[in-house]
Amino acid sequence: MSVVADAEEPGEHRGIVPDTLAEVSTREAEARPNTTLERKLGTFWRVQTVGWLFSAVFGFVSRIIAFEELAFALTLTAVLEPIGFSLTALAHSFFRDRIRGGVTLMVVVVALILSVLAGLSQMLVADAIKTAMLTQSDPNLVSGKLVIPAVYYTLVFMGWSLAYLWINAEVDVRTARVQRGEAREAALYAELNQLRSQLDSHFLFNALNVVAMEIPESPDIALEMTKRVAAYLRYSLAHHDQRLCSLSEELEAVHNYLRIQELRFESRLNYKFNVDPNIEKAQVPHLVMQPLIENAVKHGLATANGYLAISVTVERRGAQLALEIRNSGQLKTQSRDRPAVGLANTRRRLELHYPDRHRLTIDRTEDEVIVRMTLWGSACYA
């Protein structure tokens, strides 16, 4: 039968995640430099330059084929393409601030009207050049054929305008999606840090209570326990900025905790480790086993007739890392009024580090409690 329990004292640490996490992530997002505009500007000028260079090459070849006049084709290209480049650059400056809140129907209508006007202006410039250069050589080339260039240049500017608006709208959507993802990631990092800090305070609370109980009757043992608690906390502080640690480091932390309990319970506590040495470098969340070991000590000694045996087994099963903690005794029923911080903390950290890739169960038999933790793959948010 699977049940949930925790080694927690009444009234402590109400809640797992503080209400200010959203504020933390918002401040972090605001503190980051906003480079989105700079990236968009750089991308625009690169695309703008390449696009009009391609237009110049295409237009130059088309004009040679249409007019069979190299000088005329070169002149048209040298005049019209820079004008087109300049007009679209002005359009970019005009629309840049007006589409930050999104592309509206009015913006599209204005863009189409400006495209028609730009197309007509290009037509007039082209007609003036044709009149100046080709009248003497062949008057038939300039006799009122204005519709085709007007339509061509208008379509060019309309295509540019619609592409510009669509690309900016798409970039804004993707940027917003990325920013939401970054804000969520920042909130998750903040939550992981808070959960880790909560474990430290949770351990310190319980450890100091244990030391306080030993002071009246066994001051020497209490002094040695205090030293070991200090050593344990020194280890924790040395790794405070690490969300993950090697399995060997995690097991050493468990060893340190059990050594503290040994001073208190002496021969009534017996523990052993069965760990595959080939997986000691595997990365696991820091202090992920600590609350489970605390549960084993607290609930086990209270129900195991004065003697507690704990075994810790860790092995690799294909892509899975399997951890098992067994302790003699029974699992005490957890009161609803008692905040199961330690176990809830562990479950939440596993959800963040191994989303949909973990399993944590607590089962019991007549004389034994078995905790099994299975982790798939590598942890997220290292």
Image (cartoon, rainbow, N blue to C red):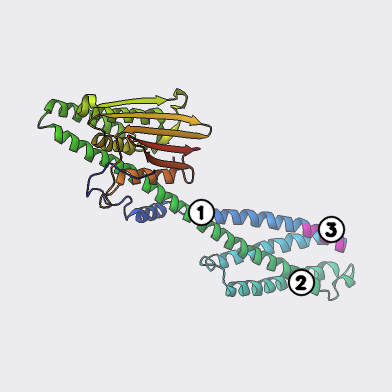
In the displayed structure, does residue 53 sit left or right of residue 62?
left
Mark 1 or mark 2, earlier in chain: 2
Instruction: Give the camera-side residue of 290 and 204.
Output: 290
Q: Secondary structure at mark 3?
A: helix
Region of the chain picked out in magenta, as a range:
58-67
Instruction: Give the camera-side residue of 142 and 272.
Output: 272
Secondary structure of the magenta portion, mostly?
Answer: helix
Queried whether the magenta region covers residue 126, the answer comes back as no
**Residue 170 falls in image quadrant:** bottom right
Q: List x then y, in percent, for residue 217.
A: 10, 30
Q: List x then y, in percent, for residue 156.
A: 72, 66
Query: To which residue does mark 3 refer?
Result: 70
> In this rendering, which labeled residue sits more in front, label 2 or label 3?
2
Instruction: Give the camera-side residue of 344 and 237.
Output: 344
Q: Could you classify mark 1 by the number of other residues whose Cα lies within 10 Å: few (under 14), some (14-19), or many (20 or more)?
A: few
Q: Amino acid at mark 3?
A: Leu
Q: Tell me the tag on residue 178.
A: 1
Q: Is residue 62 above or below residue 335?
A: below
Q: Is residue 269 above or below residue 348?
A: above
Labels 1 and 3 touching (C-beta < 8 A): no
Q: Secondary structure at mark 1?
A: helix
Residue drawn at x 18%, y 38% as measured from the top left: 209
| C-alpha span from label 2 to label 3 | 23 Å
Residue 145 visible here: yes
Q: List x then y, in percent, for residue 93.
A: 57, 65
Residue drawn at x 62%, y 75% as measured from the top left: 109
Q: Could you classify mark 2 by the number of other residues whose Cα lies within 10 Å: few (under 14), some (14-19), or many (20 or more)?
A: some
Query: To which residue does mark 2 refer?
Result: 151
Instruction: Give the camera-side residue of 3 and 293.
Output: 3
Q: Amino acid at mark 1?
A: Val
